[in-house]
């Protein structure tokens, strides 16, 4: 169980806030350092591009949805 600290006066409260903030800052600094050293394994291969992204949306829709795609896009030009 966690140890709970209770401040009864303003000085104790400020000391407790300082103590907790130092602990939090230390944790945040450690996490950012770890995050910088851990890189995704694909970062060295994809140069920031998503290799799994389908870049041609209309071709994808035609290939996988066919007639339904044509039915829903048939009236797109009438809205302009």
Image (cartoon, rainbow, N blue to C red):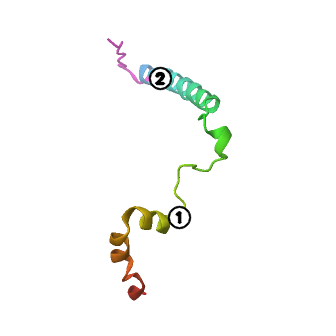
Residue 49 percent across, percent down from the top left = 61, 50
**In percent of the image, x 49 and y 66: which residue is there?**
59
Q: Which residue is mark 2?
A: 20
Q: Residue at x 50, y 26 (%)?
A: 24
Measured as percent of width and height from the top left, residue 48 is found at 63, 48
Residue 66 circle label: none
The answer to which of 40 and 4 lies nearer the viewer is 40
The quadrant holding residue 76 is: bottom left
Earlier along the polypeptide chain: callout 1 or callout 2? 2
Labels 1, 2: front one: 1
Residue 4 located within the stretch drawn in magenta: yes
Above or below, 30 relative to 51: above
Residue 80 at what x, y percent from top left?
43, 87
Left or right, 16 with respect to 45, comes to left
Give the structural element (helix, strand or loop) at label 1: loop
Q: Is residue 14 left or right of residue 70?
A: right
In the image, 80 versus 58, the foreground residue is 58
Secondary structure beneath label 2: helix
Query: Crowding at label 2, few (<14), some or many (≥20) Cα neighbours within 10 Å?
Result: few
Q: Crowding near pointer 1: few (<14 within 10 Å), some, many (20+)?
A: few
- Residue range (magenta): 1-11
How far apart marks 1 and 2 lie (CA) works out to 51 Å
Question: Is 58 within the magenta?
Answer: no
- Does residue 59 appear to the left or right of 45 in the view shown? left
Picture residue at 38% right of the left edge, 21% below the top: 9
Q: Are marks 1 and 2 in contact (CB under 8 Å)?
A: no
**Quadrant, the N terminus:** top left
The disc at residue 56 is 1
């Amino acid at each position: 169980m966690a140890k709970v600290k209770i401040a009864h006066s303003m000085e104790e409260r400020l000391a407790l806030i300082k103590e907790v903030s130092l602990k939090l800052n230390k944790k945040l600094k450690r996490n950012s350092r770890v995050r910088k050293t851990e890189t995704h394994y694909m970062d060295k291969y994809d140069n920031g591009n998503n290799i799994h992204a389908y870049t041609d949306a209309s071709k994808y829709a035609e290939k996988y949805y066919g007639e339904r795609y044509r039915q829903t896009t048939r009236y797109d030009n009438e809205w302009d």
